[in-house]
Image: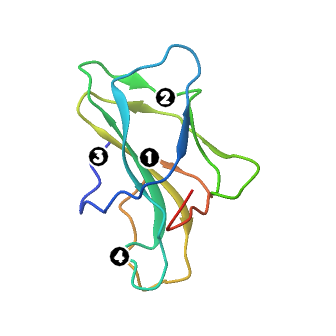
């Protein structure tokens, strides 16, 4: 597990965070980036980064992140697996954009295929 290097500006987007079983308030969404691969984008891929603020590991099996476009009528889902250690980050890579010259993300903990908006979600 790792911390995403090079902090990107978190976009003001609605990202659903669904939990199976008991919710762990210590896991937070620390970054959301929906501009991956756009013209002049610093990163090739959209991503969501989670952080474990707690003192115990959190197993993410059965959890998911969910996204709906601002005008969408349904939610897209990426299922999560793995564990976030205390103080650690968890990178969820989503869809790549068209700008192949933008920098790739570091290796992700989970890979999804959601194409997130760069302006509203």
Q: Residue at x 30, y 29 (%)?
A: 85
Residues at circles 1 and 4 in contact by the CB criterion of under 8 Å: no
Between circles 4 and 3, the one closer to the viewer is 4
Q: Which mark is residue 2?
A: 3
| Residue closest to the far right | 73
Q: Residue at x 49, y 79 (%)?
A: 38
Which of the 4 image quadrants contains residue 120? Answer: bottom right
- Residue 17 picture location, percent across and down: 53, 35
- Residue 80 picture location, percent across and down: 54, 37
Mark 2 Cα-neighbour bin, 10 Å: few <14, some 14–19, many ≥20: some
Q: Secondary structure at mark 3?
A: loop
Marks 4 and 2, the one that precedes in the sequence: 4
Mark pair 2, 3: CA separation: 15 Å
Mark pair 2, 1: CA separation: 11 Å
Marks 1 and 4, the one that precedes in the sequence: 4
Q: Residue at x 33, y 22 (%)?
A: 57
Marks 2 and 3, the one that precedes in the sequence: 3
Q: Is residue 19 above or below residue 30?
A: above
Residues at circles 1 and 3 in contact by the CB criterion of under 8 Å: yes
Which of the 4 image quadrants contains residue 52? Answer: top left
Marks 4 and 3, the one that precedes in the sequence: 3
Q: Is residue 78 above or below residue 22?
A: below
From the viewer's perspective, tell me whether residue 54 is left or right of residue 65: left
Marks 1 and 3, the one that precedes in the sequence: 3
Mark 1 Cα-neighbour bin, 10 Å: few <14, some 14–19, many ≥20: some
Residues at circles 2 and 1 in contact by the CB criterion of under 8 Å: no
- Count of all numbered marks drawn on residues in the image: 4
Q: Which residue is mark 4?
A: 42
Quadrant of the frame with the N terminus: top left
Q: Which mark is residue 109?
A: 1
């Amino acid at each position: 597990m790792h911390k995403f290097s090079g902090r990107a500006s978190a976009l003001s987007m609605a990202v659903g965070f669904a939990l199976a079983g008991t919710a762990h308030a210590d896991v937070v969404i620390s970054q959301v980036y929906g501009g991956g691969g756009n013209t002049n984008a610093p990163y090739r891929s959209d991503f969501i980064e989670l952080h474990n603020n707690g003192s115990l590991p959190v197993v993410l099996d059965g959890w998911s992140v969910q996204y709906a476009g601002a005008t969408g009528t349904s939610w897209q889902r990426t299922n999560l697996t793995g564990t976030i250690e205390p103080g650690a980050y968890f990178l969820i890579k989503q869809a790549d954009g068209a700008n192949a010259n933008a920098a790739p993300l570091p290796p992700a903990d989970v890979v999804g295929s959601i194409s997130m908006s760069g302006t509203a979600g």
